[in-house]
Image (spheres, coloured by chain):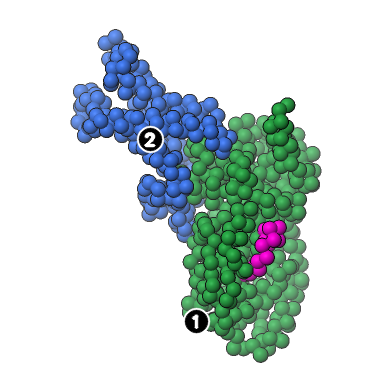
Chain colours: A blue, B green
Amino acid sequence: MHDLYAFLVGPLMWAVAIVFIGGLVWRFVAITRLARKKDPYVMHYLKAKWTLRSWGAWLIPYYPRSMRMHPWVTFFGFLFHIGVILVPIFLLAHILMWEEGALGISLWTMPEWLADVLTVCVLAGCVFFAARRMTVNEVKYVTDWTDFALLVVIALPFLTGILAHYQIFNYKFMIIFHILAGQAALVIVPFSRIGHMIYGPMVRAYLGSEFGGVRHTKDW
Amino acid sequence: MSETATATKEKEKDLLQPIYDDPGVMKGLEKLDEATIERVINQTLEAEGGARLKILVETCVHCGLCSDACHFFMSHDRDPKYAPVGKVKQTIWEMLRKKGKVSKEFLMRAVQVAHTECNLCRRCVQYCPFGIDTAHLISLTRRICHKLGITPQYIQDTAHSHSATYNQMWVKEDEWTDSLFWQEDESRDEIPNMRIPLEKEGADIYYSVIAPEPKFRTQLIYQAAVIMHEAGADWTMSSLPGWDNSDMCMFTGDLEMMGRLKRRHFEDAMRLKVKRIVMGECGHAFRSIYDTGNRWDAWESMPVTIQHSVDFFEELLRLGKIKVKTKIQEKVTIHDPCNIIRGRGLQEKLRTVVHAFCDNVVEMYPNKEHNYCCSAGGGVINCGPPHKNTRIVGNSVKADQLRETGASIVVAPCHNCHGGIEDIIHANHLGMELKFLGDIIYEHMEKPDAI
């Protein structure tokens, strides 16, 4: 059991990290090269000023009209994304692994209660999004099994994580499951629509630049 | 079959009906076979899809937040088929998913979606959390339809006109100059010393219009000429092809022709060595010159400065070149054309001009860059009579907006908006009068030279 654990958090974690980071870098580089080759005007219109303006506007909850029109999606959307990004990085147990593991670095850790709250937010977000996919007609129409699969991929590490933390069910089994689920999620990111974590800001950068620099209007 | 399923089938049949009336699509489909369809789609996606297609399709998380932005969706009881993402699903997604192996039935629906149920107004782009450019994806679908030869007949006819005459309405060269002489002649009764300068080299302004102006709305040229004259503008019009700034080829996906049109327009202005192009009250032409055609021609910036008439009228007022004589007292509302508002941010200048001439302006909401499209733009009205009801029924939200203002006059500085809103006003018995800025300015400005 210990050997398995050591393997998972050791060599396998390195492999996963390489695939995750390498995959995202590869996606960024590949799409940028393709844009340079086939859509050169994309690069021409891209401007830092409008990019930052657009990013800023869409990072403020309820600022864009679209967010105000869908208050619950905005509410769950923000909490979900905050949890998805912060918990894996700043959770105490994870930080200890960074510190004791190969990286040897120490980071700020979030209080356990906050991690719990955010984890619940992520899970609630997954349930909310899944329910929305099943009940809202315009979303249902464009939903297929992959959309649900992605929610499961995100939900599993958080669900198993909190279960392991509170030692519900078999801890040893749960922690192994948690590690594997987390690693699976990381590996899937660059090869699925969760890749929007890198593509999303890129699309917005371009669109923000067009709206700001060419169309002289707001994109929110 | 259950009742619901039968009803759905019936509804789908209804949706397809107008396409059967469109020989441009039906005759085109007859000539196609599956191998050709697959080859053309894949070649186009491969050659022109590029990074934008890839990133837009792969980033979309199918959240549906774009839906509320679309007047078609809102006007059809939130039917998901009319949601922007729903339209993408019925067009380019399927072509990508099936790697071009799509049926003629699929294409029949795809043409209808791309050409008659999306105005490329880009409102949904503002409502997508990522800013996914649905209009780009629908335009790409139209490009594929163009290459397959299944573009709706009426708009294809205008594209043919562009390629044969460099104007949209089959206006012959002598007919064009004749129209200008005719308007000049007419004006002598009102302003004896008025001229419509033609071929004046080195003028400050090259004034261009869309071909429907000499063809159907010649009074607009008259009015613009009076405004230019009274403002003391140093202006000219061209006698040669290039005078028409419109561009239906941009909407049919005939991008090669779009590039030629824009090049001719600018080259004609350069031939006359003018300082700037001022164009009439049209939205799509502005988009084509300012945002789309110039990119195809790979110009870093415009070879000649381009100015929309809303911008120009505001400048004339600001500089005191024209003065307000009388003001409209009736209730007036403002329609914001997508291509010059969401496409160029002219909303405040538009209001400056309208408020200068109207005492009682009431806004319709949402407005400015969040306006609902007229449902005629994006080449939809140009697809002609078979599809007229699609755009009228598909924009009941605009009718509601107009009704709620209680206004008796609607100002819309765009030709397509005029066509679309006029139909909406009639179909919904709104009893409103529709005006261009030129109509208002001409009627209510000081005209010292007039008899």
Residue B136: x and y in percent read 57, 47
Task: Name the chain letter of the residue that bears numbered label 2.
Answer: A
Q: Is residue B214 left or right of residue A160?
A: right
- Compared across the picture, whether B393 is left or right of B174 comes to left
Kindly state the secondary structure of the residue where label 1 is placed.
loop
Q: Quadrant of residue A200?
A: top left
The residue identified by callout 1 is: B320
The type of residue carrying mark 1 is: Gly
Residue shown at 47% from the left, 59% from the top: A216
Q: Quadrant of residue B448?
A: bottom right
Which residue in the protein does label 2 denote?
A80
Q: Which residues are magenta?
A: B422-436
Q: Position of residue A160 (x, y in %)?
A: 35, 21
Q: Counting other residues with Cα less than 10 Å from the Cα at mark 2, is it few (<14), some (14-19), or many (20 or more)?
A: many
Q: Residue furthest top?
A: A1
**Residue at the (74%, 41%) spot, across then down:** B14
Against A106, residue B173 (above or below) is below
Q: From this viewpoint, is residue B174 visible? A: yes
